[in-house]
Structure formats: structure tokens, C-alpha cells
Amino acid sequence: MNLDQLVQMTLMLFIVVDPLGNAPLFYWLTSDMERSKRRRIIKMSVLVATGMLVFFSLVGDLFFYYFGMTLSDFKIAGGIILFIYGLEGVLGRTEVAYIERGQPESIAVVPMATPLLAGPGAIATVIYIKMSLGLAAALIAVGVNSLVALLLLMRGADLLDLLGRNGAIVLTRIIAMMLLGFSVAIIREGIAETLASIGQS
């Protein structure tokens, strides 16, 4: 396992999960709750999101192999998904814009665990990491990001005070732009590999 690649992939998953941008949103979704209940809901959401990402780390690539997809195919498809995800973030069309606060137990799973943490972009990313670097790298990336997300989400109120509403919006846009850059690089790499394989055949 290449350490530099592992760090890069872990960072890419961090950008997709976006705990910094989600922390103020999580606080807003749970702002009517007592501190103890808010912390319990956040822990539940991170646990559910982690379980989902671990599941797709283990078996997600099997679905693609079953349908005859290559790693290059998935790089292109996954890159497109990440591009759309990043573009929506730049344009401000995130899932939270359509969310109304509901029952605590329900919002812990939807929308907090998914799609805000373990959405299509994160799922595509962990499968990409496994197909590129192996299962161990995918699990390490998920574990590191789950821990970081839990710590940051627990401090959502502090982050909101520090950044302010406009600061949180700006941070989300910057992270989305970084995600767009990652997605373009993945798509370019997938296309280059596909063209090379066609040339060899």
C-alpha cells in the first residue's frame, strides 16, 4: 500500500463526507434537542454512516465485477458522480436545502447518516479506494474519516459560532470546488486508461 496514495484517498473521502460543512447543518437539525440527546443522535448517525461505507467497502465492487465493469470504467462513472455532487455543492443545491426537521430517531438516519455523510459520492469514493488500493486502504479511510467526522460534528455549535452562517457557506463552496478538481482528475485518468487499453487491443 502506497502511503502517499492512502493519504490522498483519505483526504478525498474527507472532502466528499465534508464534516466541516455538515457540522453547522447537523447542529441546525438538532438545535431543538437537549445537549445529551443531540450527542446521542450524532453518534447514531455517524455509526450508521460508517456501517454503510464499510458494507460498500466490502462488497460494493462485486456488483461492478458482476456487470463486467473494469476499474477504468468505474473511475469514469465514479468521477462523474463526484463531479455532479461537487457541482451541486458549488451551486448550493445540497440535500439540506430540502430538509425539514423531523423526529430525532428518523433524522439520525435520514438525512444525517445518508445522504449527508454516506451519500452517493462517499459510496463511490470508498469503492474507488478499494478497487485502487485494496480493502485495507478503504477501511482505514472510512475509519479515519468516521472518527474525524464524529469529533467535528460534536463541536457543531462551536464551528457555527466560529464560522458564522456565511463562513459555513463559503467553506462548503471551497470544499465542493476541491471535490470538482478530484472528480475531473479521476475521469481523466479513467479515460486515459481506457484509450490505452483500446490501443493495445
Image (cartoon, grey):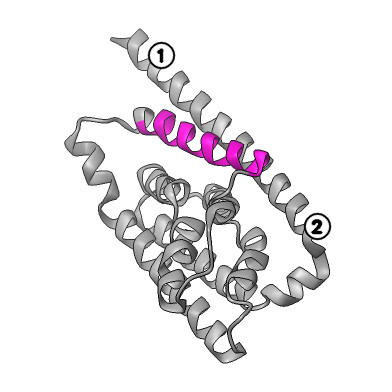
Residue at horizontal 28 percent and vertical 49 percent from the top: 60
Q: Is 199 included in the stretch rendered in magenta?
A: no
- Residue 26 location in percent, x, y? 59, 69
Q: Amino acid at mark 1?
A: Leu
When the figure is inspected, residue 178 is found, relative to residue 30, above or below; the finding is above
Of 103 and 191, the residue lying toward us: 103
Mark 1 = which residue?
Answer: 195
Q: Is residue 113 above or below residue 122?
A: below
The x, y position of residue 169, in whole percent, is 74, 53
Q: Which residue is mark 2?
A: 167
CA distance for labels 2 and 1:
42 Å
**On the rendered structure, is 107 left or right of 51?**
right
Amino acid type shown at disc 2: Gly
In this view, 111 is above or below 159? above
Q: Name the residue at 54% across, 53% down.
A: 98
Dot 2 or dot 1: first in sequence order is: 2
Where residue 66 appears, as percent x and y from the top left, is 17, 37
Q: Secondary structure at mark 2?
A: helix
**Dot 1 crowding, Cα within 10 Å, few <14, some 14–19, many 20+:** few
Disc 2, disc 1: CB below 8 Å?
no
Label 2: few (<14), some (14–19) or many (≥20) C-alpha neighbours in 10 Å: some
The part of the chain drawn in magenta is 74-92
